Image (cartoon, rainbow, N blue to C red):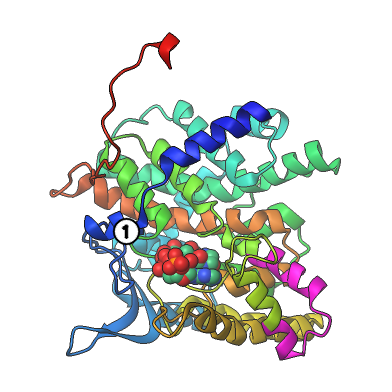
Amino acid sequence: MALLERLARSAVKCCEVDKELYNVYNVKRGLRNADFTGVLVGLTNIGDVVGYTKGEDGKNIPQHGELYYRGYEITKLTRGFQADGRHGFEETAFLLITGQLPDNKDLKEFTDLIKQEQELPFSLSKNLILSLRGKNIMNMLARTVLGLYTDDDNAEDYTPENLIRQSISLLARFPVIVAYAYFGMRHSFQHKSMIIRHPNPDLSLAENFLYMLKGDDYTRLEADLLDLALVLHAEHGGGNNSSFTTRVVSSAQTDTYSAIAAALGSLKGGLHGGANIKVIEMMEDIKKNVKNWADEKEVDEYLTKILNKKAYDGSGKIYGIGHAIYTLSDPRCVLLKEKARELAKEKGREDEYNLYESIERLGPEAFYRFKGSSSKVISPNVDFYSGFVYQCLGIPEELYTPIFAIARVAGWAAHRIEEVTSSSARIIRPAYKNVSTRRDYVAINRR
Ligand SMILES: CC(=O)SCCNC(=O)CCNC(=O)[C@H](O)C(C)(C)COP(=O)(O)OP(=O)(O)OC[C@H]1O[C@@H](n2cnc3c(N)ncnc32)[C@H](O)[C@@H]1OP(=O)(O)O
Ligand SMILES: O=C([O-])CC(=O)C(=O)O
């Protein structure tokens, strides 16, 4: 331990860079401009995320969030298939990957391809169920995705047809891999029974995931909600950390499985897709430490403690709040909140829902007080209510970020295809200015 502590002290000391140098060299920390917008690093036709408008003076004016998939506004897209009483995730994936909304024939053929790919090769299922010990489903998923390379005779073929084939296969297999990994993990680490169901080709992707987890013990409403959550999580432009990772890794001309495994590593992070689990853990902490959930003063004091790094995980973050682009609202959060309210009523969890609502309001207020008046405008993001919705659906916490991945693989696939096939493709390679001093070599016995 003493050695590790000494090495760690030395490493941290060597890492430190005077913050002022970022201004001196005009470095955009986190690839962000001073007005909180992202540094423009690419052009895309896939997702569009809108959080502010530009005023005449060039300054940003916060606005309610808008999200477009291939030009289609997300609320209109979801209302469209909901009005027809059908699930929309497969259709959304088709739209993201091919650029067009499918007609009935396209959708049937695309869905049939997904169904054909759902059944995993026996060797892969056997490995997943019996050998792939793991403590975290995101890591198990990433390891399995890397393993899929071996089963793919055309793994290194970067033609658009092959990229689409690989995308459909990943889309189909993610829910099955996640369900098997979950039961494998429960069996080996929690001493619970392992339940392995074959995917059911008569079901939509959302229904099939619930079926693989719970058998027939789910309702139509629950399947509709999961389908909606998948649609809302499917894509978010090229700049979000995991899609950008997909693009960076793909730009080096590597294979699909390596790029998607890297994206999974990114999505797992607590500041990105992993925030849905962090929110639930934070809420448990708040519920334990705030005696009267209806007392706004007490809730506010606890949120201030979190911001001061004196409560919850000591990071100073209120999880599920804030976004790189959205300001006044995240449209996905607005849609999920509607469902969270309905579910809370149905499941008798209104007190908890009310606590979420007050944190949604008090969190940003505490943040502005803490950061001062020039701080960025923040509101709850997609991860704020998603965990609560999944809890109400009886989905275990370990699956929250994997569900995000089941959805987002559609967006990653689209970004990979765009990156690999673009005629303007170039390896992504920004610069780091070295700010250390040059040193003369010292022989080992004189150090
Ligand atoms: C699917 C998704 O990925 S949605 C995002 C999920 N992540 C979370 O919910 C985690 C909590 N939120 C955050 O950490 C941030 O808001 C992010 C990571 C989502 C966006 O980060 P950024 O756009 O980089 O915010 P940015 O760093 O510009 O924010 C400005 C300041 O506000 C702070 N801040 C932003 N959000 C929060 C928050 N929720 N709690 C506390 N402080 C925050 C930042 O730490 C930063 O402080 P600094 O200037 O002292 O470094
Ligand atoms: O856009 C971002 O930075 C994060 C996000 O909301 C997402 O990827 O869904």
- In this rendering, is residue 406 above or below 433? below
Callout 1 environment at 10 Å: few (<14), some (14 to 19), or many (20+)? few
Identify the image quadrant of the C terminus: top left
- Seen at 61% across and 27% down, the residue is 123
For label 1, the SS is helix
Q: Main secondary structure of the magenta part?
A: helix
Q: List the single residue furthest toward the left.
A: 423
Q: Is residue 310 left or right of residue 316?
A: right
- Residue 391 x/y as whole percent: 73, 68
Q: Is residue 104 left or right of residue 384?
A: left
Residue range corresponding to the magenta coloring:
279-300
The foreground one among 344 and 155 is 344
- Residue 255 x/y as whole percent: 35, 35
The foreground one among 439 and 320 is 439
Residue highlighted by disc 1:
20
- Seen at 69% across and 53% down, the residue is 398
- Seen at 57% across and 78% down, the residue is 336
Query: Looking at the image, can residue 325 be seen?
Result: yes
Q: Is residue 357 left or right of residue 96?
A: right
Q: List the single residue furthest toward the front.
A: 446
- Residue 410 x/y as whole percent: 42, 56
- Residue 17 x/y as whole percent: 37, 48
Image quadrant assignment for residue 15: top left
> Residue flagged by tag 1: what amino acid is it?
Glu
